[in-house]
Image (cartoon, rainbow, N blue to C red):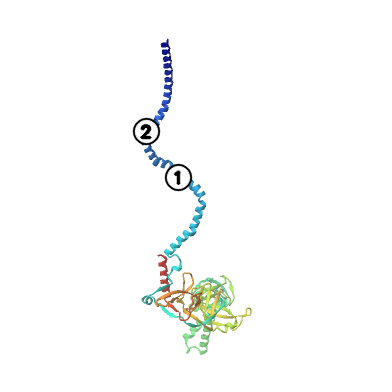
Amino acid sequence: MLYKLLILTLFLSLSACSNDESTTGKHTEKGGHVEHANHKDAEHHGKEKQASHDDHAEHKDDEHHDSEKQGSHDDHAEHKDDEHHGSKKQTSHSDHAEHKDNEHHDEKQEADDGHGHGGHEEAPESVDITVAQMQAAGIVVEALKLSDVKTSIRAPGEIKLNAYNTIKVSPRINAQVLARHAVLGEEVVKGQALVTLSSVEMAEAQGQLLLADKEWVRVKKLGRKVVSARRYITAKVEYEKTYANAKAFGMNEDEIKNLLSQKHSADGSFKLVAQQAGRIIHDKFIVGELVEAGYELMVITDESTMWVEARVTPQVTNSVNIGNNAEVFLGNEKFPAKVMQLHHSLDETTRTSAIRLEVKNDDDRLHAGMFVATFIETQNTSKALQVPEEAVLRSSDGDWQIMIEQDEAGEFKAVEVELKKVSNGMAIIGSKGANIIGPGTRVVTHGAFFVQSELAKGGFEIHNH
């Protein structure tokens, strides 16, 4: 009995174990997947551990650099836009401003110091020129000395026609204009036909001249032995009178010759010709117009020389003599002139006296009616420093300067001066600022341009160091 009970208990135990195994099997099978996953991790971590580490290293070098590169760059960009612009933006701008004011300025100063951009301060103050160079360039050095210089006065003036070189073209008898042969502004030569006129008086004069000429020719042919002395003289006088009348009315020598040779009929026509070369500055008529004797048809003037009338006080006139030098300024243009006449009457309105100047106008720059400024020399003199005009030059800054010799011969320095006046090729100069010049100062009077060029050349070489 006990034996059966033991067997039953064992059987139940085996049944329970069987159920546990079945359940455990299921669990095992289910857990197998887990174990399989764990196995996969284990095996992968076991067998492929080294590869995983290698891949990881490669991934770190490649994938991380590839995958994270963009992120790094994006982060960097974001960092640049946010952190740099946020946290460092003010600092960056401040540093930049400070850098611009300090470092850039320092670098620029260093660059200037290195390349000579410091301006004219780096240019040499003097230049040495050898004796051979001075002789080749024609450099002459002379000591300044005080000279007697005539003082001058300034006066307003007006350009006038030179009346001595101006003529009016007008008929001597009443006539009608038949044709025009020259126009306003045209340059004409002496003897050139200007206008053709016709007149009844001229026709009568031409007819009388033809009759007188034929009578005179006949009497001359017969001679004094055949005709009486009275007839001979009368014929000759009549011919000369009619010839003079025709010429006085306006016919020229060629026209009279053509008339007497029957190449020209006595129709009363004749031409007015230019009595001198010049330019037509006045022309006031139309073809077909009837004009009276003395009517001003044209005005011809030679503008190579013009007059200038300067108005001054009577006291000033007493200190000016005929022949004194003068200068006429039209804007910045200067024209040399001479005093040719002093008026001895005052203008009724301004109560001033006129000084007439004669000025050359070769370039045709001066025309009647222009207002100008004049400088007229007087007989009064004063002491002043005077050098040839070529010794005074313009500097690069536009100031006037001269070349002064230093303590050693051949060493020259440019010194700015005040240019007071230039007349007849001589310049009157004075000290300017701290640059003191006076009698005894040795100045380059000829060849100053060469010295200035050598100074500029030295400055150019340093500037481009």
Between marks 2 and 1, how big is the CA–CA gap?
A: 36 Å
Question: Which dot, 2 or 1, sits closer to the camera?
Answer: 2
Position of the N terminus, as image quadrant, is top left
> Residue at image x 40%, y 32%?
41
Q: Position of residue 117 (x, y in %)?
A: 44, 64
- Disc 1 target residue: 73
> So how many labels did they put on this image?
2
* Mark found first going from the N terminus, 2 or 1: 2
- Disc 2 target residue: 46
Q: Residue furthest right?
A: 349
Viewer-closest of 236 and 50: 50
Q: Position of residue 58 (x, y in %)?
A: 38, 40
**Classed neighbour count for the residue bearing mark 1: other residues with Cα under 10 Å, few (<14), some (14–19), many (≥20):** few
Q: Residue furthest front?
A: 2
- Identified by mark 1, the residue type is His
Q: Is residue 106 above or below residue 424?
A: above
Residue 178 seen by the camera? yes
**Classed neighbour count for the residue bearing mark 2: other residues with Cα under 10 Å, few (<14), some (14–19), many (≥20):** few
Q: Is residue 327 above or below residue 87?
A: below
